Amino acid sequence: MEKSRKAAGPVSLATIAAATGVSISTVSRIVNGQTHRASPETVTRIQQAVESLGYKPNQIGRALKQGRSRVVAMLTANLNNPVMAMIATATEAALRDIGHVMTLCDTHDREDLQDEYLQAMRSQSVGGYILVTNIKSPGLADFVARGEPVVFACRPNPYAADPDAPGAFVGIDNEAAGAAAADRLWARGCRSPAVIMPLEGSVVTLEREAGFCRRMTELGIPPDRLARVKAPGLSHLDVGYAAAGTLFAGRPGPDGILGVSDQIAYGVYRFAMEQGIRIPDDCPVISIDGSDLNGWIAPWLDSIHVPYAEFGHHIVGQLQAIWRGETPEAAILPFHD
């Protein structure tokens, strides 16, 4: 018997039809389990061709034919941030595995855009919503009140009845991550620390700052030796650059800095490089995100690693629980320090 050979290129229903000498419609019926209209010999021939050529059914196309929406809308902010791209990529792959498709919207952290996208997606009767970032808005409050199928990631539901039980949410313990960053700087001899965060901080950046400052205080750093610098702007690159200008304007400067995101740390590094300040030799910088890009573009950066690539699986699992009529519990994933 001739050994089965997988096809070199993509295998479609047309490929199977050409290999077996039957129509595409006949192949389609048999692949979908409708074997009563074909002879046993034809069914066997097609099934053998499916196996030998390595045909995989198009789960997305099959799902969309079932009469209910299999489209899920993801709303996030600032897609130029690699973190957002990592979460979107992981979630899209997890949705595709269960026969769903994803549409992606960038709210730029603007209330009006967030509500506009929520309304637009609702008018398209999408099957679920994922808010990777969110801000309080009338539209979001309405969505939560109506019990729409929404999963939150990174930033929890701002309208949760019990903040300690946010429901459908995927994230990390940001305060603990901030404390871990403090421990790491302390171990490197940092005794005049600084933390940089956006002036328009989210719950994520506020919690990371709070955990860092609390831990530094526990370690014995007096308040007057702990610099907290905020800078305006939606771009964390700009925030880090501007805040570094403030920090290094006087002497002596800090002997260790936490940027509450990788991009803030990149901005700090750019300013320090322009001023001849050597990082990490003169001042180590630590961040919280741990992008895979750091090994390529920021080997100087010490970063707490957040498992963003794992978010997608948990997000989709929580959506499926909501679709089954269940109330999922929050998934607080471990970071790696």
Image (cartoon, grey):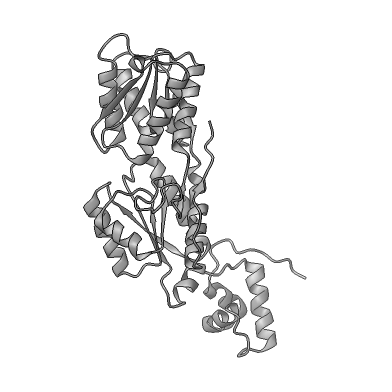
Using the image, determine if residue 284 lies above or below residue 178: above
Q: Is residue 153 above or below residue 282?
A: below
Image point 48% across, 54% down: which residue?
315
Picture residue at 45% right of the left edge, 56% below the top: 92
**Which quadrant holds residue 289?**
top left
The residue at the point 26 percent across, 20 percent down is: 245
Q: Nearer the viewer, residue 34 or 122?
A: 122
Q: Is residue 137 above or below residue 124?
A: above
Whether residue 169 can be seen here: yes
Q: Is residue 191 left or right of residue 307?
A: left
Residue 295 can be seen, yes or no: no
The image position of residue 195, as x and y in percent, is 36, 25
- Give 80 or 283, whichever is nearer the viewer: 283
Q: Is residue 168 left or right of residue 136?
A: right
Position above or below: 130 against 269: below
Residue extending farthest to the top is 251
Camera-side residue: 120 or 19? 120
